[in-house]
Structure formats: C-alpha cells, structure tokens
Image (cartoon, coloured by chain):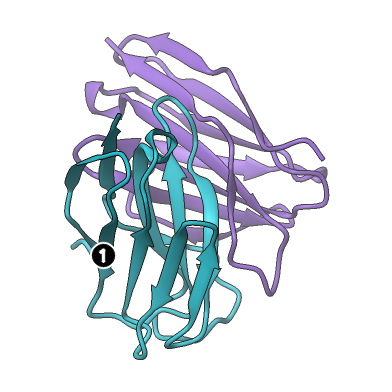
Amino acid sequence: KAGVTQTPRYLIKTRGQQVTLSCSPISGHRSVSWYQQTPGQGLQFLFEYFSETQRNKGNFPGRFSGRQFSNSRSEMNVSTLELGDSALYLCASSPGPGSYEQYFGPGTRLTVT
Amino acid sequence: TQLLEQSPQFLSIQEGENLTVYCNSSSVFSSLQWYRQEPGEGPVLLVTVVTGGEVKKLKRLTFQFGDARKDSSLHITAAQTGDTGLYLCAGGPRGGSGAGSYQLTFGKGTKLSVIP
C-alpha cells in the first residue's frame, strides 16, 4: 500500500505570495491532518479534515486554510506569505474513527524569502 | 503552552550503550505515540500505547505509559547508529475522552546521536 504523498517536496516563495500544498493520504484513510514543523516550535497542529469537513483547527491565523476533496486528498493554502512561514509542512493520514495513529508524508519544505 | 515536555533535548551516546528518554505532561491523554524522524523526512510511527501502565517492546525498544496516562518513557537497549534521529512523543485527545478528535499534541523531541 502506498504511503502518504506530498507535493511539491520543496518550494521557494517570496513574501506576500501565496502557496498551495497538496497531500494524498494512504488509500482508505479518511482523516487528513496538517502540521507545521519549525526548529523553535516543533510540530504544531494546523487543522484536521474528515470526510471533507474541517473538524479541528489549531492556533494559526486565517491566512492558513485547507480543504479536503471527496477522494480524501487534501490541500492547504497559505496566503500573504511571511518570512516566519518558512517551515516543513507535514501531512498525516489516519484511517478514521477508533484510530489515533497517524501516518506522515515526507513533508513540503517551504522557504519564504 | 507546551503540554508535552520531552527530556533530554539532546543525547549523544556510544554504540552499545543503553538510554532512556522521557515524555511528561500535566494532562491526561487517551493514547500516546512515539515517532522517529530523520532529517528531511516525516515522522515514522513506532508505537501507540493506550492503557495506563502498559509496556510494549519492539526489538530493542521498550515503551511504557504511566499509570495515570500523563507520562511515557522510551528505553533503547544496546543502541545502534541506525537509532540516530529525532524521537517525538505525541498525545491523543486530552482528558481521556477518546471521542473522535484527531488533534495530536507533540513534544519538541529528543535528538539522539549514536556514535560508532
């Protein structure tokens, strides 16, 4: 079974631009979560989607948004990029109710200049 | 507020030595997971513990969940260079409800270096 895939793997943007990151979960997994990882803050929860509905949202500004499609694939968008948005963005999928285990993709390394 | 504290932050040991890393919280968690992450990659799930007092063994790795479900430890016996990486603990829904939420809370990790 293929793992979680994320595209692109690396991205360089300038301040003020926007970016869209994509995540394809493990086949059959219906829950997708997004995390931001930085050296100073570690892994911080962004949001979680299940059956196309956002069920949880972390403490991030409204510039961070996401969505999930009917095939469980998910995208996250960051608008008006700031230097502090430079981070590794990780997507994780989970089978659904009754399972707390999450399986991570390799991440997208975003650099904002 | 960091809800899961991991210690030590950094650990450098010789191959063959034993080590223990800790994950502590003032909150109760329904489940606790340990991940290992290598540079440039996503975390890889090692184990999930769900019952207070539970001990799980995975080859040379022993994981323990505290009786009160607020803390956990990971013990590695006879460390190998392949054990090098960032070890992260993550707690399931707080309060022990176990009801539907998939928001994991992560510690900042213990960076382990095993020197040959």
Among the 4 quarters of the image, the one containing residue A71:
top right
User: In this image, B22 relative to B53: left or right?
Assistant: left
Task: Give residue B79's position: percent from left, percent from top.
Answer: 36, 46
* Residue A49 placement (x, y as % from top left): 62, 54
Q: Which is more toward the observer, B101 or B106?
A: B106
Residue at position x 40%, y 9% from top?
A: A12
Q: The C terminus of chain A is located in which quarter?
A: top left
Give the colour chain A carries in the figure. purple
Is residue B52 toward the left or the right of residue B18 in the image?
right
User: Is residue B4 something that shows in the picture?
Assistant: no
From the viewer's side, name the closer residue of B50 and B83. Answer: B83
Packing grade of label 1 (10 A; few <14, some 14-19, many >=20) is many
Reading the image, the residue beneath label 1 is B22
Which chain is cyan in the picture?
Answer: B
Kindly identify the residue that appears in the image at 48 percent across and 83 percent down: B54
Q: Is residue A37 above or below residue B88?
A: above
Chain letter, disc 1 residue: B
